[in-house]
Image: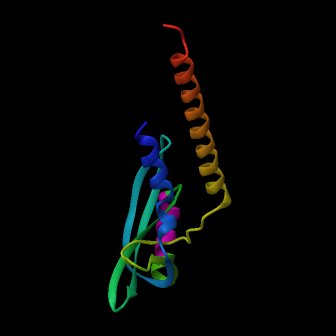
Amino acid sequence: MIAIPVVIFKAVEGWNYNWKEGTAHPVEYVDVQERIVDKSPNYFYKIIYSYKVDNKDYQIPKDLGATTQAQAASALEVARANPVAIPVWYSATDPSIATLRQEETHWQAYLLLLGLLILMLAYFRWLLLNYYALELLPT
């Protein structure tokens, strides 16, 4: 029962950040590595991006991949030959917390929280009704 609030907190944790947008530049390229995904080999390479906030450098990795090693190696060579800056979103209070995709709070998340609240209220109502029913039983 304790795991449910923990999962909910982790799901909505990113909503509290005041995200600011910056620019990240590639600084390092990690060679192609094979990983087994869904029982079949896939090939991934990593690009390490660097972004600067208040004259301090931070780094964030981005994994990219392909289904064949040749495709991944080719894409890595293209990325090395044509380095492209990408947008990065970081927390205004702690710039080391960053993401390469913009975080948004969607209405579905609020609907999920409303549904959980309704379920909890219904459960407590049921619990109280059963408690009072037991109290009213003749002894």
Outermost residue toward the left in this view: 56
Tell me which residue sits at (53%, 63%) in the image: 71
Q: Give above or below for 105 relative to 58.
A: above
Rendered location of residue 109, percent (x, y) = 61, 55
Tell me which residue sits at (46%, 67%) in the image: 73
Note whether residue 21 is visible. yes
Outermost residue toward the top in this view: 139
* Residue 3 picture quarter: top left
Note whether residue 83 is visible. no
User: Colour scheme in the image?
Assistant: rainbow
Tell me which residue sits at (55%, 29%) in the image: 128
Q: Quadrant where the N terminus lies?
A: top left
Q: Nearer the viewer, residue 96 or 50?
A: 96
Q: Examine the structure image and report whether residue 74 is included in the region drawn in magenta.
A: yes
Rendered location of residue 110, percent (x, y) = 63, 56
User: Which residue range is magenta in the image?
Assistant: 69-77
